[in-house]
Amino acid sequence: MLEVRRADGPWPESTDPVLSGQELRRVLTDPEQWIPARACADRVWLSVPEVVRARWQARAFPAPASGGFPHREEWTAVEETLLICTLEASGWLTGPFGVLQSPEGDWSLDERLAWVEPQIAPLVRWVEQGWIEVYYFPGREEGFTVVPAGELLTTLADPAVLHEDDDWGAGVTCEFTDAGLGAWRG
């Protein structure tokens, strides 16, 4: 069921050749293939049928007993926007490519909070459940800060984190946690 393949191009493809015999033995016993200390000329990858991949994912990311995210046909417009943003590798909540509508800069704190709250209510709940993690990147070259559920509203209402004029890579983004991947499958 498990095959070792040699990548012919820049990305693994299902048409890449399967290794066997001495070549397979050499690759499997070479620690440099699996724990490289330098760039490796051989680019090998593991291939399994979809049924095996699904079984591995089910074990790695078990669905919570309480259920998971709403089914797609039950999503509200806000939930759909937030879940698609979370699913996308390049999804941003704020910034020029962000999915949230930013409050006006001259609004009072109460006005900004009232504007942001309905846009992120489901996200707060999912962060509290440990299914999604939210990150603030102050700049492209800087590290991120994890934004706890209790600080999401005030953080996303703060004009300093919106980065409306910045390039991609600064602002607030989110992604599924391992538990969230299980909830997504659930």
Image (cartoon, grey):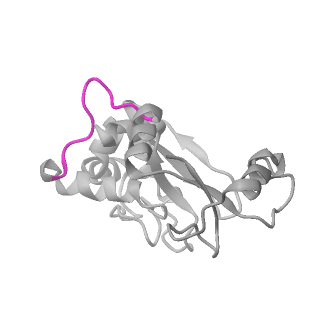
Residue furthest to the top: 65
Above-or-below relation of 131 to 119: above
Q: Residue 35 location, x and y as percent?
A: 78, 47
Question: Residue at (19%, 57%) from the top-left corner?
Answer: 77
- The question of residue 95 being in magenta is answered with no
The residue range painted magenta reads: 61-72
| Residue drawn where x is 40% and y is 53% of the image | 86
Residue 128 location (% of width, % of height)? 38, 31
Total numbered labels: 0
x 32%, y 54%: residue = 82
Tell whether 95 sits left or right of 42.
left
Q: Is residue 64 magenta?
A: yes
Residue 148 shows in this picture: yes
Front one among 71 and 10: 10
Can residue 153 be seen by looking at this rendering? no
Q: Is residue 95 above or below residue 122?
A: below
Position of residue 154 measured from the top left corner of the image (x, y, whole percent):
43, 44
21 relative position to 83: left or right: right
Q: Is residue 5 above or below residue 121?
A: below
Judge from the rendering whether residue 109 lies leftward or rightward of residue 32; answer left or right: left
Instruction: Point out the residue furthest to the left here.
Output: 73
Extreme residue in the front direction: 21
Q: Nearer the viewer, residue 68 or 41?
A: 41
Looking at the picture, how far across and down is residue 152, in whole percent? 42, 42
Q: Quadrant of the C terminus?
A: top left
Name the chief secondary structure element in magenta: loop
Q: Is residue 102 left or right of residue 137?
A: left
The residue under the point 49% across, 51% down is 48
